Each structure stands twice: as structure tokens, then as C-alpha cells.
Image (tube, rainbow, N blue to C red):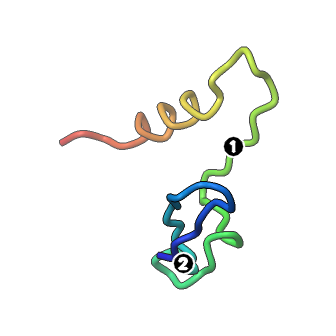
Amino acid sequence: MNGFGFKNLPFGYPISIEKLFHLNGTPREKFIPTHLVIPADINKDEILNKGIKIINTFQVK
């Protein structure tokens, strides 16, 4: 975390500047999820619908 301040105010704010990585070592900005959904319609929650389809493929024992 690094602290940054305002020019004309007596207080500041902290911002993390650490580089983030996926568990497999891929930098966060280069990670592409296994189930990538690119929304095409703002009136539908395509990400939720894809998630439900994925969850429904698992069989409960």
C-alpha cells in the first residue's frame, strides 16, 4: 500500500500498488476465465444465465 495525498487538503488515501496474479501465476490483466461470457444484450443477465447452466451440469450425489 502506498499513501497519496491531495495538494490542498490535509488528508490522503491509500492505494495498493502490488501486482496481482492468478493462482496459476498468470498476471491478473492477462487471465482469461474458462467460461468467458461477453454480454451482448443489456436487458439479459447473460453471465448469471451461463453460471446457472454450468452449475446445473454438476450432478448431486
| Residue that protrudes farthest toward the left in the picture | 61
Q: Is residue 21 above or below residue 11?
A: below
Q: Is mark 1 on a helix, strand or loop?
A: loop
In the drawing, what numbered circle is on residue 48? none
Query: Residue drawn at (47%, 75%), measured in percent from left and top?
Result: 1
Q: In this view, does 21 lie to the left or right of 61?
A: right
**Which residue is identified by label 2?**
21
Instruction: Give residue 39's position: percent from left, percent from top.
Output: 75, 34
Q: Is mark 2 on a helix, strand or loop?
A: loop
- Residue 36 vs residue 4, the one in the foreground: 4
Instruction: Give residue 26's position: percent from left, percent from top.
Output: 60, 80
Query: Residue drawn at (54%, 85%), measured in percent from left and top?
Result: 25
Instruction: Give residue 40's position: percent from left, percent from top.
Output: 81, 30
Q: Is residue 21 above or below residue 55?
A: below
Mark 2 vs mark 1: in front: 2
Query: Residue drawn at (71%, 72%), measured in percent from left and top?
Result: 30
**Which residue is identified by label 1?**
37
- Residue 8 vs residue 38, the one in the foreground: 8
| Residue that protrudes farthest toward the top in the picture | 43
- Residue 49 vs residue 8, the one in the foreground: 8
